[in-house]
């Protein structure tokens, strides 16, 4: 697994590729802690290149979302419509529970929009 912290249009961004499982979830968690300041309004977690996600990875997504929510920050997860992990996310109930975007551009629109406009469905096939 590879974890690349960075930013897109001043929004913290973490790109993850490869397999995400219980042996490496802590690397993503550490990257989030190191990348997201208290001043950030959102974090984009790009899972476009993730080829496998186990239950520990799904649990991490929920934990990150809860942690961000406590700080009044939003987690936006990029999962393209043809992604390998989409079935896992569907089976785990993530779709409709967490904010997903089908592309980085869609994630940026969500992350940069005012909080009061972030309820319900989002543009470009995303849900909230």
Image (cartoon, rainbow, N blue to C red):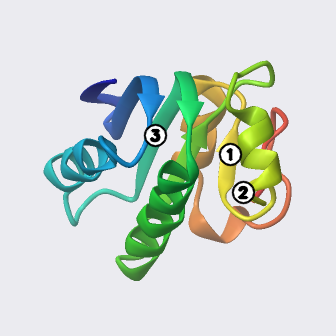
Q: Position of residue 1 (x, y in %)?
A: 34, 24
Q: Which residue lies at the image location 81% right of the left edge and 32% below the top edge?
A: 124
Res 9 visible: no
The residue at which mark 2 appears reads as 94
Of the numbered discs 2 and 3, the one sitting upstream in the chain is 3
Q: Mark 3 and 1 residues: CB-CB less than 8 Å, in contact?
A: no
Classify the position of the C terminus by image quarter.
bottom right
Mark 1 neighbour density, 10 Å: few (under 14) some (14–19) many (20 or more): many
Q: Up-down: is 107 above or below 94?
A: above
Q: Are marks 2 and 1 in contact (CB under 8 Å)?
A: yes
Residue 99 located left or right of residue 122 = left
What label sits on residue 33 in the rendered view?
A: none
Residue at screen point 84% across, 63% down: 120
Task: Decide if residue 107 is in sight here.
Answer: yes
Height in image: 24 above or below 71? above
Q: Position of residue 18 (x, y in %)?
A: 44, 20
Chain-order first, disc 2 or disc 1 = 2
Q: Residues within 10 Å of mark 2 (few under 14, many from 20)?
A: some
- Asked whether, in this view, residue 112 is left or right of residue 25, the answer is right
Label 2 sits on a secondary structure element that is: loop
Residue placed furthest toward the front: 23
The residue beneath circle 3 is 45
Q: Residue furthest bottom?
A: 70
> Earlier along the polypeptide chain: callout 3 or callout 1?
3
Give left or right: position of 87 versus 26: right
Element type where label 3 sits in the image: strand
Instruction: Say which residue appears at 81% left-offset and 48% top-offset.
Output: 90
Relative to the observer, which residue lies in front, 124 or 17?
Answer: 17
Q: Name the residue tied to disc 1.
A: 100
Number of residues whose C-alpha sits closer than 10 Å to that of mark 3, classed few (under 14), some (14–19) or many (20 or more) = many
């Amino acid at each position: 697994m590879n974890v690349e912290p960075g930013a897109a249009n001043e929004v913290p961004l973490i790109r993850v590729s490869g397999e995400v499982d219980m042996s490496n979830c802590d690397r993503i968690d550490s990257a989030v802690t190191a990348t997201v300041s208290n001043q950030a309004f959102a974090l984009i977690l790009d899972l476009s290149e993730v080829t496998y996600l186990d239950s520990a990875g799904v649990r991490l997504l929920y934990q990150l979302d809860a942690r961000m929510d406590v700080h009044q920050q939003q987690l936006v997860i990029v999962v393209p419509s043809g992604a390998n992990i989409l079935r896992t996310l569907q089976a785990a109930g993530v779709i409709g529970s967490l904010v997903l975007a089908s592309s980085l551009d869609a994630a940026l629109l969500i992350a940069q929009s005012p909080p009061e406009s972030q309820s319900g469905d989002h543009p470009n096939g995303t849900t909230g």
